[in-house]
Every structure is written in C-alpha cells, then in structure tokens.
Image (tube, rainbow, N blue to C red):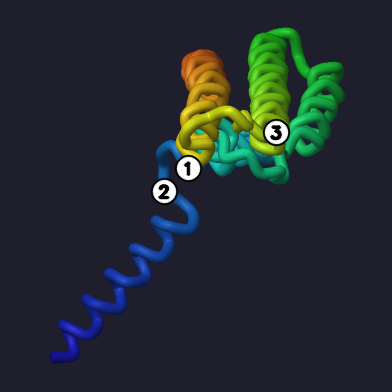
Amino acid sequence: MGRLIFTLILSALSAWVYVNYVKPGDESVQSAFASKDESITKLSQFTDGNIAAILSPIAGKAANSGFHEIRQIRASILASKAKAAAQDQPTYVNAIALCDTLAEAVQEREQCNRSLIDTRSKPYHSSTAFDPAKEEQEKRKFFEGGIHHRWAERAASYQRRVNALYRILSAQRR
C-alpha cells in the first residue's frame, strides 16, 4: 500500500514538472511569440473574437463595430514593425494588411447598415395601391434585398481575404 501511494505521488510530481517546466509544443512557441510581440497577439485575439460578428448578415441596427480597436492595434503593429528585425518584417506587413482588410470590412458593413436603416425609414406605399400593406412589403423586400445581397457578396470576399492573410500570418508566427 505504501508503494502505491509513493508511486502515485511520484507520478503526480512528474506530471506537474512536465506541464510547468518541460512541456514542448505549440503553446511554448505561441507564448514566446506573444511575449515577443503583443500587438500581433492582440490582432489574432481580436480577429478570432470578432470575425463572425463583422461578417455576419446585417440587421439594420447600429452596433459597436470595433473600428477604433482595429486602428489602435494597427498603430501598435506599425510601432513594433519599426523596431523589428529585417527577417520579421513580412510578418508585420501581413498583420497590417489584415488590419486594413478588417477595417475595410467594418466600414463597408457600417455603410450597408446605414443604407438599410435609411431604406427602412422611408415609406413605400402609394395612395392608389389596391393593397397598400402588401405593396409596401414587396417594395421593402425588393429594396432591402439588394442591400442584403450586396453585403453577402462583399462579406464572402472579405472572408476569403481575411482567411488568406490569417493563414499566412499564422504560418509566419511559427
């Protein structure tokens, strides 16, 4: 019984030492990179946490876009780029391109949202219509459908660009 307890304690101690001091792998690489440049880590966290919201279908409601946060991250990356070694410059160039793409997507989303809000604020019925409610519904569907369709196409384009830049940036971080 004593040997069993001794073996369990020794196993637990070995596991603790391994996890806290020896463990190799991606986490140690990522944490080393994170301490090396926090601005790119912030960009990665922002992208992971907000890309779905940025590229989601528009709802015609004013929302917090994250544009200012993207600009702050971009400024931080630019400052880090100025101090970075020559071999790290491509990483910063891709990070800046990712920031610019995200900012562009956010601005276009806001523009489509404003268009949708403006479209919804206008009456569509005419006084000579047989069924004014039905006519208004059809016109609203027609006008709003164009805005939704345009954003869906642009969001797909932004998704492809963000995925490509993010893939390159992730490969460069390793």
Q: Nearer the viewer, mark 2 or mark 1?
A: 1
Instruction: Give the Cα separation between the discs numbered 1 and 3.
Output: 54 Å
Residue highlighted by disc 3: 122
Badge 1 vs badge 3, beta-carbon distance below 8 Å: no
Instruction: Give the Cα separation between the discs numbered 2 and 1.
Output: 9 Å
Which of the two labelled residues, at mark 1 and mark 3, occupies the earlier sequence position?
1
Q: Position of residue 14 (x, y in %)?
A: 34, 64
Residue 23: numbered disc: 2
Q: Residue furthest left?
A: 1
Crowdedness of circle 1 by 10 Å Cα count: few (<14), some, many (20+)?
few
Q: Is residue 163 visible?
A: no
Q: Three-letter amino acid code at disc 3?
A: Lys
Q: Three-letter amino acid code at disc 1?
A: Glu
Q: Position of residue 113 (x, y in %)?
A: 66, 32
Residue 27: numbered disc: 1
Crowdedness of circle 2 by 10 Å Cα count: few (<14), some, many (20+)?
few
